[in-house]
Amino acid sequence: MGSTETQMAAPEFRYISLSYSHADSQASALRLILTLNPDWEGPGNNIEFVRFTDGITNTLLKIINLKPGLTEEQIDNEAVLMRAYGNGTEVLIDRERETKSHALLASRGLAPPLLARFKNGLLYRFIRGKPCGHQDLVSPPIWRGVARRLAQWHAVLPSSGAASAKDTSGAEIAASQDDEITVIKPRRAGPSMWAVLQKWVLALPVTTPEQRARRLSLQAELQWVLDILDDGKGVGEDGLVFSHCDLLCANVIVLPSENGLPTPEDGIAPVNFIDYEYAVPAPAAFDISNHLAEWGGYDCDYNMMPTKSVRRQFLTEYTKSYCEQRGLDASSQAEIADRLYEDVDRFRGIPGLYWGVWALIQAQISQIDFDYASYAEIRLGEYYAWKREANGSRKQAGEEMPLRESRWASEE
């Protein structure tokens, strides 16, 4: 059963010419794992599939072989994660760049080994640990671990990330535009979160006059935020760092601590990040504010948003790690932390625009049971609430500050 055509896609991993089928989940996943590991077939093997349901885009399965006599740790050390892409998500995600990003991260010890690519997904080594729930993200040992790990990403990886033949560049955007849209021109050409967001706006449905008008409105918002935020003043090369851009709770894995204690002695939980499909060059402030926005979870509970004092502590931890990784003098830390604090504050509304546009597309293409249309309105509402604070229109109208903005403005 393990025989099928395979070929080398790159020196680091194989390409398996098979697909995962949502309609025939276990059988198709079994074919994939036996192609990858033929020795898992036959007597003495007991393959099981564990489905993770925290994601809202892809299908994620943990595949384990319960061989007699193995400990749980030994089983996990050989376990494989299979991630199958959601329906139509190639509109949103450059899969070639994702694969190369994973390989780059693995080469720096920041991602698990990538084992194989198949027609509609990836197979990679399982990371032992516990995926976070959104309530875990507000735990100081965990957010300190996230701050340190994210700083490591931003400090040691090339800001350009992993190149792709399909990278969202000005040429690709120009080729896909229509007469109604004047595309943005980010300060730095090539892939970036700005270029990704432009691509998404261009991909919005325009079958009705209302959809057409909304796309034009969102394009105007994109141009406006680019004009005020794309200034190249952040950390990294030309104000950009290679960013995860999707640090929601399920993508943060708390690793087993070396001493076995639930809270490490230094008060910082060891964490790793998974799921690199949205990883792209971006301002560090966007990556950080995007993660902090996820403290509210999929339900967008704004009571969980970090206050000013918590954000300062998070950025102090981040900056300490960043300077250590870059070999910068400790005297630079306060200046970098102060600048990042201001930048994260300025970027706090942009994740709402980013994921709001994303969700409008998902509402048209996804087969996953999730109310993307309502989610889009909630996230876009975050953006517009921030904009009304930024331009003073909410205060001028004498209206009450929305909960998310109020929580963000709180000191404690």
Image (cartoon, rainbow, N blue to C red):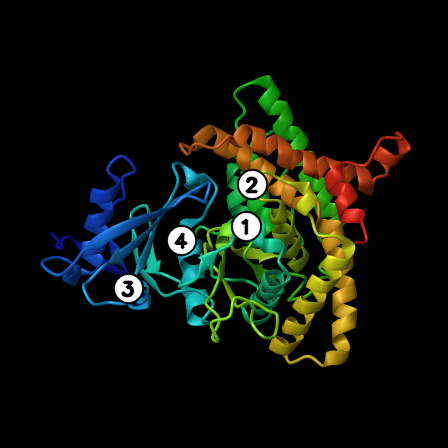
Q: Mark 1 and 2 residues: CB-CB less than 8 Å, in contact?
A: yes
The disc labelled 4 sits on which kind of residue? Glu
Q: What label does residue 96 carry, if any?
A: 4
Numbered circle sitting on residue 313: none
The residue located at (81%, 36%) in the rendering is: 401
Determine the CA span between mark 3 and mark 1. Answer: 27 Å
Label 4 CA crowd tier, 10 Å (few <14, some 14–19, many 20+)? some
Q: How far is disc 4 from disc 3 in space, using C-alphas? A: 30 Å
Residue 16, picture quadrant: bottom left
Q: Quick check: marks 3 and 1 in contact, CB under 8 Å?
A: no
Tag 2: amino acid: Tyr
Secondary structure, mark 3, is helix
Badge 3 amino acid:
Ile
Q: Which residue is mark 1?
A: 248
Q: Residue at x 76, y 48 (%)?
A: 408
Q: Nearer the viewer, mark 4 or mark 2?
A: 2
Residue 24 placement (x, y as % from top left): 24, 37
Q: Is residue 292 above or below residue 319?
A: above
Q: Secondary structure at mark 4?
A: helix
Front residue of 284 and 59: 59
* On screen, residue 69 above or below 279: below
In the picture, the disc for residue 75 is 3
Q: Residue at left 45%, top 44%? A: 55
Residue holding disc 2: 298
Q: Is residue 90 left or right of residue 218?
A: left
